[in-house]
Image (spheres, rainbow, N blue to C red):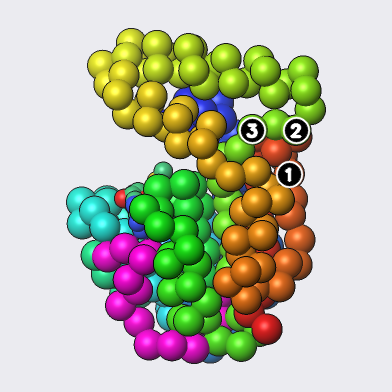
């Protein structure tokens, strides 16, 4: 889905994302990837220890295990809204294309805040609606009409692609998302937009 949504560019965005994560990492600290899926982020990270992956779907972990077989990753099946870790445990928590799926962002963000150490970083990457007006309307039409149609042809799964489109359209604006993070207690470090916000990286810190 990510490949179709981004015409494959999400792989470059993930590489960029991982380089940002690396710039804040130090070898003895632990990193948690939430909504880790099939393990792309840890696959790209040139780190092989102190890695923790959480996803509600155990089959995703099985794919990740094969992909990341040279790495020592602690896998857990679970939800962002109920993290099975102690407080102040991680220096870095990442979540790529997962926040959109949280059932309750407020609880998810508070759980992430609880499990981060003081001065720890939360990195998010998520699809959004471009800010530029011309792009905005054509992109919304792409999401509403082209994406579900393409999905039904490629994978015979119109429903999943419609869910993807709806979840992007109903995702909060950047300002609203940042407000939710700041209300949780995070300090905003920076937001990096690609294609005028069709994809964005948010970096926030626990103070
Ligand atoms: C689009 S995939 C992203 C996977 C991976 N992070 C990537 O970038 O390739 C979204 C993932 O979110 C997971 N997910 C859904 N609801 C979740 C929740 N409430 N908490 C944590 N992960 C969730 C799904 O199981 C799925 O693996």
Q: Are marks 1 and 2 in contact (CB under 8 Å)?
A: yes
The residue carrying mark 1 is 193
* Magenta region, residue range: 78-92
Q: Mark 2: give few (<14), some (14-19) or many (20+) Cα within 10 Å.
A: some
Magenta-colored stretch includes residue 47: no
**Mark 1 against mark 2, which lies toward the viewer?**
2
Residue at (73, 67) in percent of width and height? 188
Residue at (70, 38) in percent of width and height? 197
Mostly what secondary structure, the magenta segment?
A: loop
- Which label belongs to residue 129? 3
Mark 3 lies on a secondary structure that is loop
Magenta-colored stretch includes residue 85: yes
Residue 108 point in image, percent of width and height: 43, 65
Q: Mark 1: give few (<14), some (14-19) or many (20+) Cα within 10 Å.
A: some
**Closest to the observer, 121 or 17:** 121
Q: Is residue 130 left or right of residue 57?
A: right
Mark 1 C-beta to ligand 1 under 8 Å: no
Q: Is residue 65 left or right of residue 187?
A: left
Residue 24 point in image, percent of width and height: 67, 74
**Closest to the observer, 48 or 125:** 125
């Amino acid at each position: 889905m990510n490949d179709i949504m981004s015409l494959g560019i999400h792989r470059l965005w993930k590489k960029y994302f991982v380089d940002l994560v690396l710039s804040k990492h130090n070898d003895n600290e632990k990193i948690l990837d939430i909504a880790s899926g099939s393990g792309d982020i840890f696959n790209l990270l040139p780190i092989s220890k102190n890695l923790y992956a959480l996803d509600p779907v155990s089959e995703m972990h099985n794919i990740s295990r094969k992909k990341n077989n040279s790495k020592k990753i602690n896998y857990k099946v679970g939800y962002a809204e109920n993290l099975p870790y102690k407080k102040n445990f991680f220096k870095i928590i990442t979540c790529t294309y997962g926040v959109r799926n949280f059932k309750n962002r407020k609880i998810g963000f508070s759980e992430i805040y609880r499990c981060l150490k003081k001065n720890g970083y939360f990195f998010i990457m998520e699809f959004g609606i471009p800010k530029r007006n011309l792009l905005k309307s054509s992109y919304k039409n792409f999401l509403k009409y082209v994406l579900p149609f393409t999905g039904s042809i490629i994978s015979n799964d119109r429903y999943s692609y419609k869910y993807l489109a709806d979840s992007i359209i109903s995702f909060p604006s950047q300002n609203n998302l940042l407000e939710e993070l700041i209300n949780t207690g995070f300090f905003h470090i920076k937001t990096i937009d690609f294609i005028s916000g069709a994809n964005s990286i948010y970096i926030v810190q626990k103070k």
